[in-house]
Amino acid sequence: MKAFALKFVLLSLIITGIVFWINSSNVWYSLDLNEKYTYARWNSLYNITEQHDIDLLMMGNSRIYNGINPELLASKTSTTPFILGAPGASIKDQYFSLKEILKRTKVRMLIVETSCISKTKHSAESVSRQLKSFDAKKDIASKLGSTPFLFALNHWPYAWFKSIRNHNYLFDDQQDFEKNKESHQDFLENIHPGEDGKYMGVYQLYLGRFNKANGLTKKTLERYKSEGAPADGRQMTIGPDSKYYLKKLDELCKREDIELVFITIPVYYQHIKRYEVRQAAIADLIEPLGRKWCDLQAPFDKIAFSPDCFENIYEPNQHTTKQGSLVATQKFAQFLQQHFADILPNRSQEPLWNELFYGQEYYFYKHPVKPNDPKNRTLGPVLSEDGVRIEKLCLQEQTSPPTIFAMVKRTAETEQKLKTKALRLTLGLRNQHGKVTAGYSHLEYCGPCSSERHLVFTKTLKKLDIVDLYGMQFVEAKHSGRGKAR
Amino acid sequence: MLFNSFQFLLFFVLVTGLYFVIRHKWRWLLLLIASYVFYASWNAYYLALIATSTLVTFASGLLLEKQNANTSSTQTKTRNKRLIVAGSLIVNFSILVFFKYYDFLAETINFVFRSDLAYSSFLLPVGISFYVFQAASYTLDVYKEKIEPQRHLGKYALFVSFFPQLVAGPIEKAANLLPQIDIEKSFDYERVRSGCLLMLWGVFKKVVVADRLGLFVSEVYGGAEEVTGLIPVIAIFFFAFQVYIDFSAYSEIAIGAALVLGFRLTINFKRPYLASSFKDFWKRWHISLNSWFFEYLYINLGGNRLGKLITTRNIIIVFLISGLWHGPSWNFIIWGGINGCFLIFLDRFLSPQKTTHSLFSKMGRGFIILTCWAVSLVFFRAETFSDAIAMYSSMGIGGVDQLFDFGLNRDAFLLAISGLVLVYVVDILQESGIRDQRIFNLPLAVRWGVYVFLAVSIIYLGAYGADFGDSSFIYFQF
């Protein structure tokens, strides 16, 4: 029996080895945008948690990563947020995702978007959705542990081996093999930090954010009137799986001292009927847990959530646009300040946090302003009049208040020479009468904003209509301030 | 839990491992629990039906034995025994009739009498025809005193529900299976290896060949009214191969699994498409069922002892009932009737005595049998009578330019044909007396190459997965 068992195991290993080998060719998986971004989101989380704990971890399905703007939330709350949503993710998936995340980082608050509390089962569709998130996860032990709960037994090989899952490509999509391979290569090259400072390339997601939709058109608004709402609160049932894992999630949060909060990212008010049925069902789940719920669907703020805030779609699931996400984030930030101001940290003075938002590696560096963007302008690299190379000079009007900042490479020489100085910009400014006049703006050295590689000089502006840059020079910091040019 | 599923693989490895670890006296219990778990994976509620069938036939066996020991007159004993058997069979077959044939009967009565009988909302219990027939054969064998009744309820329950053959046979006779439960089995390397190879080959046949042929068949049958020419002709031949490969694959997995556990089940198929006559064909096709009908129905009707006319009547009755056994539909009854007619009317022309023994003659006979069989199977495969007629009507010549538009593209079609050829070659080798065991005499590298080839082919060339829906064995529905 031992000899047979040994041979059986050996044969199984050979077959598994062959499957691994076939699997490794990356031709079995035509990554669609959802898959790429889910992968990117997890990748981004792993990168960020190397240095930062996550204060506000937001989980849910596509509604959450379309619905919250983490940059705005960060600036409003001075916390470190991250959105770890996955397309069609269930509450069960969130539970296992959180378990994996807690192996890497502390989480202060878990925010769960309620549309993922739904009817989940092992249907082909739910499996396919679950696989996107499962593929993107990185911790093998967590994945192994969650496999029996996330997938029916017969789906285990599909979950672990893309080549088994998609083996029918052999007959259907052979011609696409090369395309799949190229797509994979391109994705892998663009998702990891590059040597040239390019952080994550085209598949980068800032803190999990993702927006792609355009606002509602008149035609769709008319359909709401003529055909009624495409979504029905009565049909959004909650399965026993969701109830069970919501409870488990709550228990896990209690054990780990994580504040659990719920949010509902809204759809347009005419997009859903009988929301009160859904609302009551969710409330029945949440209230016994004693958790807070920020329901942006009801009461619906018709003034703030204009039609521009919602995806132009006439199907049950609707996402918010970027504008919608900004409104939702503003409201959610207020909700947090109202209920949790005492438990959330204020990281605005922490260098690491500032690095996350203002340093070389993060947001402003990774999101260079487009050349033709009228609201945001950037220059770089340029030489100042006294010969200092300025890597980048940016005017960011999208931040609130508008910010102007400059980055100089950190060396022993620049550090010694420039730390006590300010960068004086001579600007062409349009006054209230529309006339252009010259003026100075002094950018002060900002220690917390500076990184190991760059010195950052920054200044927040009031309302300022800059039309030109005449010159720049480092001057002693004591001379900072605005004045008329000579 | 299908045999061709990952779930079954794990289940079987676990059960086998435990089986050889625990002591012999508890093995029947392990197998009984495993069998009930296996069945419960489809529908746990329907375990009650198996349990009822088990209890009734078990009790009838004990009551029949009691009658044998009874000192009353032979006439009384015979009458009592008949009552017991009748009672047992009525209860047993009532389960079958109610769950399998009620809707068919109601539909027929409603049609004939323009009545409005309600239909049932029950799902057909998987394998009900198999275990009911197996349990019934036990009662009949005890009644005829061919076997002693089993006095151990647990072991008898295992006989009725033994998982390798529970849902699609082979329909085992108590005389074969029951004594094997009591025999202590050691882990025999050669036997286990043979069983595993048979299972591997069965899964290969099912997943790589039968299910791929099935893709083409389903597409053509699904649009029978729009498809004309040679494609429907190809589809009916493909279905003939699909149904054979699918069911023989199931039987091989069942026999292989039982062999690993130390049980020898009845051979269910002996290369039927190499038969030389229809009579020969039915001796090779679904042997356990045909033996059942032969022994318990045909012989009791008088067999061939009462003249040609009665023999013909008996054959037709057996084939009609056999058709009905396959499914609650007139299509199956017609299919059975057609095959009965083939046996009665065509076999005289195919009889080996009346034809030469040349290779050409053998091939000719084989082709005629296969063609007749394939044509009859249209009634077996089509959903309704009109679908079957539409299929016949659509057959013709031409239209092959669309060959690769029906579920199989060029590569998949070639794979299906290659698989078919491989199965046929293996059948011919077996028919020539070359036994599967020969593979074990090959050098290690070749042997392992075969195992790896089969396993990797199943994984990568199999027609399974989300795109293909449920790939149950065809005979599960019976």
Image (cartoon, rainbow, N blue to C red):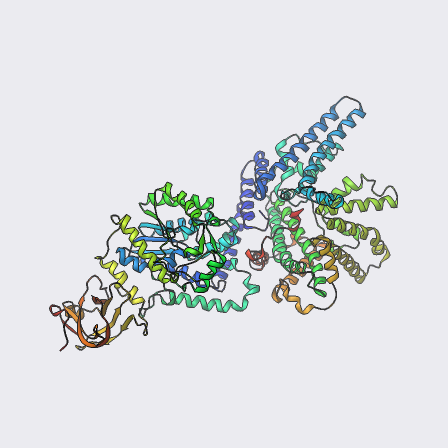
Q: Can you name the residue that lies furthest to the top here?
A: B71
Q: Residue at x 64, y 66 (%)?
A: B404
Residue B340: percent from the left, percent from the top? Answer: 80, 50
Q: Residue at x 61, y 66 (%)?
A: B411
User: Residue drawn at (63%, 39%), measured in percent from left and top?
Assistant: B161
Q: Is residue B107 visible?
A: yes
Out of A204 and B18, give the one closest to the viewer.
A204
Of residues A476 and B285, which is closer to you in this image?
A476
Q: Position of residue A479 (x, y in %)?
A: 11, 70
Question: Which of B427 and A325 lies nearest the eye of the viewer?
Answer: A325
Apparent side of residue B21 relative to residue A218 in the rendered image (left or right): right
Q: Position of residue B200 (x, y in %)?
A: 60, 52
User: Who is closer to the viewer here, B126 or A322?
Assistant: A322
Q: Is residue A311 left or right of residue B81?
A: left
> At x 40% / y 45%, what residue is drawn?
A246
Q: How many marks?
A: 0
Residue B171 is at least partly visible in this image: no
Q: How far across and down, in percent of the image, does residue A313 sit?
A: 45, 61
Picture quarter containing residue B99? top right
Using residue A12 as the reference point, say whether residue B284 is left or right of it.
right
Question: Within the image, what quadrant is residue B18 found in?
Answer: top right
